[in-house]
Amino acid sequence: MANAFLFFLLFIFSSNIIFENIHACNQSERSSLRFLALTLSSPHLNWTSADCCNWEGITCNEGGWITHLQLPSKGLKLKEGTFLSSSLGNLTHLTHLNLSHNSLYGSLDQTELFLSMNDLEILDLSYNLLFGVLPSSLPSSHIRMVDLSSNRLQGEIPSFFFQQAWNLTSFNVSNNTFSGPIPSFICHPSSSSLRHLDFSFNKFNGSISSGLGKCSKLQVFRAGYNYLSGTLPEDIFNSTTLEEISLLRNSLYGAVSDRISNLTNLTTLDLSYNQLNGVLPLHLGKLSKLKHVLLDFNYLEGSLPLSLMNCTNLIELRMGANNLGGDISMLNFSKFSQLNKLDLRHNNFFGIFPRSLYSCKFLKAIRVGYNNLEVQIQPEILSLKYLSFLSLGWNKRLTNISEAVKILMGCRRLVVLSLASSFLGEEMPNGVEMADFNGFQNLQILDLNSCNLSGIIPSWLSKLKNLQVLNLNHNRITGSIPSWLGTLPRLQTLMMQFNQLSGEFPKELCTIPMLVSGKTAAQVGRISLELPIYCRPSAHAKPLQYNYIFYTPFIYLGHNCLSGNIPIEIGQLQLLQLLDLSANNFSGNIPDQISNLKYIEVLDLSMNHLTGKIPASFTGLNFLSRFNVSYNNLRGPIPSSTQLQSFNASAFEGNLKLCGAPLSNECQTTMGADAPEMSTQDADTEEHQISWFYVFVALGFNTGFWGVCGPLVLVTKWRYAYYHFLDNVQNKFHVMRAKRMASMKRRFV
Ligand SMILES: *[C@@H]1O[C@H](CO)[C@@H](O)[C@H](O)[C@H]1NC(C)=O
Ligand SMILES: *[C@@H]1O[C@H](CO)[C@@H](O)[C@H](O)[C@H]1NC(C)=O
Ligand SMILES: *[C@@H]1O[C@H](CO)[C@@H](O)[C@H](O)[C@H]1NC(C)=O
Ligand SMILES: *[C@@H]1O[C@H](CO)[C@@H](O)[C@H](O)[C@H]1NC(C)=O
Ligand SMILES: *[C@@H]1O[C@H](CO)[C@@H](O)[C@H](O)[C@H]1NC(C)=O
Ligand SMILES: *[C@@H]1O[C@H](CO)[C@@H](O)[C@H](O)[C@H]1NC(C)=O
Ligand SMILES: *[C@@H]1O[C@H](CO)[C@@H](O)[C@H](O)[C@H]1NC(C)=O
Ligand SMILES: *[C@@H]1O[C@H](CO)[C@@H](O)[C@H](O)[C@H]1NC(C)=O
Ligand SMILES: *[C@@H]1O[C@H](CO)[C@@H](O)[C@H](O)[C@H]1NC(C)=O
Ligand SMILES: *[C@@H]1O[C@H](CO)[C@@H](O)[C@H](O)[C@H]1NC(C)=O
Ligand SMILES: *[C@@H]1O[C@H](CO)[C@@H](O)[C@H](O)[C@H]1NC(C)=O
Ligand SMILES: *[C@@H]1O[C@H](CO)[C@@H](O)[C@H](O)[C@H]1NC(C)=O
């Protein structure tokens, strides 16, 4: 009993001693921390008690020295005029410094921040506002991890930066503005521990010099989104431990060496958006662990190596926009039991669309558009339960649209369906066979453009409650525009150019919910697409990539036979950004209410029979970047505003009674004798037709997929924040595609 009591006392006593020891905070370090706290403007750190080892984010060692300073995601901000470095420099025993995801502003080079941190092992200052160049060397020989990603650092990586960093395992400087060469010298012979290297999203340039092959443990090498050129360094294939190589969006050229088959642990190979050429490595199939192969947007040629069939772990195979070819039916896809995404668009593959694909049970996305495949939709496609993205258009003729639609309707998860340039000359399925139509409940994009389909706009479309983009451009559709289009709850892009639609512009179309109410539009969540869609803003611009459907409130009804007045209700489509009614038979005045479309960027009313004046209220359309009322019977002065006067005279020409700048004829106070009327037919110049047309053909070509690209043609001009991520690509693509585009244009014109 007494023993137990004694033991109890002893316990209390000893634990007190431990307590005392652990919390012996060095007063000098305490004052350094206090100083740090004083330089922070927010938030308030409760760093007041005597023992600084108890403070939030602080850990001390047994000697009472501060070893860890970890305050990630605390919203830390420095007061103006103070620097991070000056207050931290005195914590000489620090091993872990983690201040990531704050708003720390300052230059790393400014003071001797690192100079005294000779024990530092972990340095994480990612996601801050640090700028300037790097100090000449890393602080400590014990350093293991360095993460400076997502700051605003710049300059070259100094050549002695890694001099003593023998134990460095991970170095991440992605998402800064570093320039100069990739520091291949990071792998000096004595530092064999490097595993992760991330240089992506910077401005590194020049070729990747050899050296990385010396990193005998390297697993991840990322340097995508830079300005790198030259060939892949040969010695990288000596790093047999590599699991990921991501060098997308650079200007690398040359062939991928067959030595890549030495990298047997490779799971991710992303070299997309470069200028690689030559044939694919014959023995690629030795890389049996490959999961993600992304080689799209290069100049690769030849066929897919048969050995690829041994890559049975493939999840994603993306080879689009290359010069690859060969008979695709030679490939047996049934071995790809894990395959999720297959993208072979825009190549020269031929042969029968392989049925073996239907045994890839997990397929979510298939895009083989723009090849020479013989595609026919088979009922087996229903075994692809997860299929959400299907793009087969621009191949050898697909036939029997009724049957195809009937089958595809069973693909319950389908979100994107593009069958452009298929079923040529058939009739749009409608009527009895579609009576029980109950499919496509998740469909958001339907692209049947350039199919030359006849018939009317079928009523089963009215059941597609999730449809956002409908592209029926370039068909022979007749009849009137059905009023139920105005009730489709998600519809935001209506493309029906180049058809034979007649009748009036239905008033009901002016109630499309997504174009009327910002609330409705905002409620529609963006789901990401299984494959990105591409398009270029103009014929010679770089292709842009979109990973989800943008809000594109556009109506294209140009080049039809629509007549009657433009309804005044059009003013309700407040959110509309593009309205193309060109080359129809619209008559009457231009309704004043169009000036309610305050976001309108493109307004094309050309080549109609519109009369009267251009409403003076048009001077308030501030976003207009394209405007065309040419070849109508408009009269009177062009309203003066910087906006309307900024367009070329060609936007107004062909209206003989229209006057004032930018036209050269000045307005008379009394109108002269009536000039001879000019019919719209005469006015329908070929040149004019081509300008719109050109853009669309161009898009079709780049994308093999017009559905969304058509409307997205304008987006780069937009101001909205959500376009900020649009990335650029090398110029070269347009050279290649411009040629094909030209031949395409000939086919249509
Ligand atoms: C506290 O640290 C300073 C140097 O930073 C050192 O000179 C001093 O001896 C330390 N005090 C104690 C009690 O360890
Ligand atoms: C850092 O230590 C030096 C002397 O070693 C001292 O002069 C300076 O005031 C200290 N800085 C802070 C912020 O405590
Ligand atoms: C500050 O921390 C001390 C103990 O370290 C605690 O007693 C006090 O309540 C805290 N103050 C605030 C405002 O959180
Ligand atoms: C820094 O802290 C964040 C948040 O806790 C964590 O995710 C990150 O891994 C840490 N950095 C390092 C290098 O450990
Ligand atoms: C590097 O790491 C090894 C193994 O963890 C360790 O023994 C050695 O002391 C470290 N070297 C330095 C300079 O930290
Ligand atoms: C580097 O940091 C970024 C965040 O800035 C992160 O997305 C990326 O995965 C990191 N790279 C590696 C190889 O861990
Ligand atoms: C780059 O950094 C910015 C700002 O810190 C951040 O918003 C953005 O998401 C980062 N981008 C990437 C690709 O990590
Ligand atoms: C890299 O970029 C810098 C600055 O833009 C330039 O001076 C240098 O010549 C470039 N180096 C190479 C190899 O292109
Ligand atoms: C790659 O490694 C082999 C032997 O492992 C060596 O002979 C060769 O020089 C290395 N290649 C390069 C480019 O470093
Ligand atoms: C490949 O990965 C396995 C398992 O992760 C590992 O045991 C093996 O050493 C690696 N091979 C190479 C060459 O790094
Ligand atoms: C790499 O592969 C080649 C054959 O492609 C072979 O001769 C060489 O020995 C391999 N090197 C290594 C380091 O495995
Ligand atoms: C696939 O792998 C097997 C076994 O490793 C091998 O015998 C066969 O030749 C390979 N097939 C191809 C096409 O490379």
Image: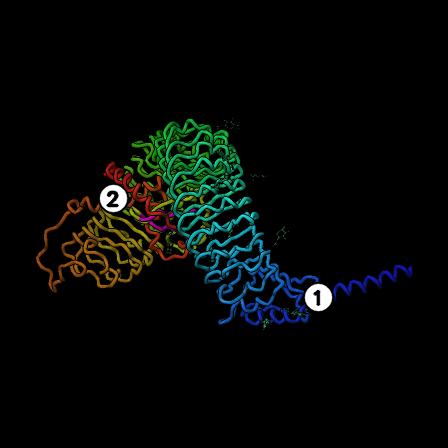
552 in the magenta segment = yes
351 in the magenta segment = no
> CB under 8 Å between callouts 1 and 2?
no
Q: Which mark is residue 184?
A: none
* Residue 107, percent from left and from top: 48, 65
Q: CA distance from mark 1 to mark 2?
A: 81 Å
Is residue 143 toward the left or the right of residue 504 in the image?
right
Magenta stretch bounds: 541-555
Q: Amino acid at mark 2?
A: His
Q: Residue at x 53, y 40 (%)?
A: 240
Earlier in the chain: of badge 1 and badge 2, it is 1
Q: Residue at x 26, y 51 (%)?
A: 604
Closer-to-camera residue (681/121): 121
Figure check: 224 above or below 72: above
Q: Residue at x 51, y 71 (%)?
A: 82
* Residue 580, percent from left and from top: 28, 49
Name the image quarter holding the C terminus: top left
Closer-to-camera residue (641/706): 706
* Residue 380, percent from left and from top: 46, 29
Per the image, label 1 sits on a secondary structure element best described as loop
Corner quadrant of residue 424: top left
Q: Residue at x 44, y 52 (%)?
A: 201
Closer-to-camera residue (526/31): 31
Residue behind mark 1: 23
Q: Can you see residue 603? A: yes
Question: Would you call the spot at circle 2 few (<14 residues within 10 Å), some (14-19), or many (20 or more)?
Answer: many
Q: Residue furthest left?
A: 673
Per the image, label 2 sits on a secondary structure element best described as loop
Residue behind mark 2: 559
Q: Amino acid at mark 1?
A: His
Q: Can you see residue 500? A: no
* Residue 210, percent from left and from top: 46, 46
